[in-house]
Image: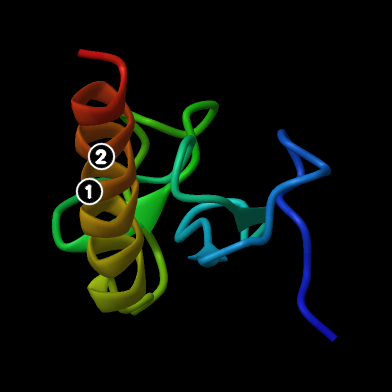
Amino acid sequence: MISKCYLHPRDDAVGKCGVCHKPVCSKCGKKQEGKVVCRNCAGKKPVSTVDTDELERQERIEKAKEASRKGRTR
């Protein structure tokens, strides 16, 4: 079962916050010191070794979707 983001319950989580360990989506997960952190924990020191590869992949997908939408509206 895919977990959902604790801040965006309709969005699939791409990782867990390195500070509070809650699931986060690509919209609210931010990279900090090579780890994923939620916006509520931003600025706090990450304590886990959460891999950022999935977050980076999701960010690229979101940017491509946005570029595609912009291309269709012109």
In the structure shown, which secondary structural element does the residue marked by tag 1 occupy?
Answer: helix
Q: Look at the numbered disc 2 and give the secondary structure of its residue.
A: helix
Residue hosting label 2? 68
Using the image as rendered, state which of residue 5 and residue 59 is in the foreground.
59
Q: Amino acid at mark 2?
A: Ser
Residue 64: which numbered mark, if any? 1
Would you place residue 73 above or below residue 6 in this image? Answer: above
Q: Are marks 1 and 2 in contact (CB under 8 Å)?
A: yes
| Between marks 1 and 2 in the image, the one whose residue lies nearer the viewer | 2
55 displayed left or right of 19 = left
**In the image, residue 39 lies at what x, y percent?**
47, 29
Residue 56 versus residue 49: which sits nearer the camera?
56
Q: Is residue 74 left or right of residue 19?
A: left
Q: Position of residue 17 (x, y in %)?
A: 51, 56
> Residue at the spot x=77%, y=78% of the render?
2
Q: What label does residue 47 carry, if any?
A: none
Q: CA distance from mark 1 to mark 2?
A: 6 Å
Q: Is residue 55 above or below residue 27?
A: below
Q: What amino acid is labelled 1 in the image?
A: Ala
**Dot 2 crowding, Cα within 10 Å, few <14, some 14–19, many 20+:** few
Residue that appears at 22% across and 48% down: 64
10 Å neighbourhood of mark 1: few (<14), some, or many (≥20)?
few
Quadrant including the C terminus:
top left
Quarter of the image for residue 35 reads bottom left
Residue 69, x across and y down, in percent: 33, 30
Question: With 20 as the anchor, is 11 left or right in this view?
Answer: right
The residue shown at (76%, 44%) is 6
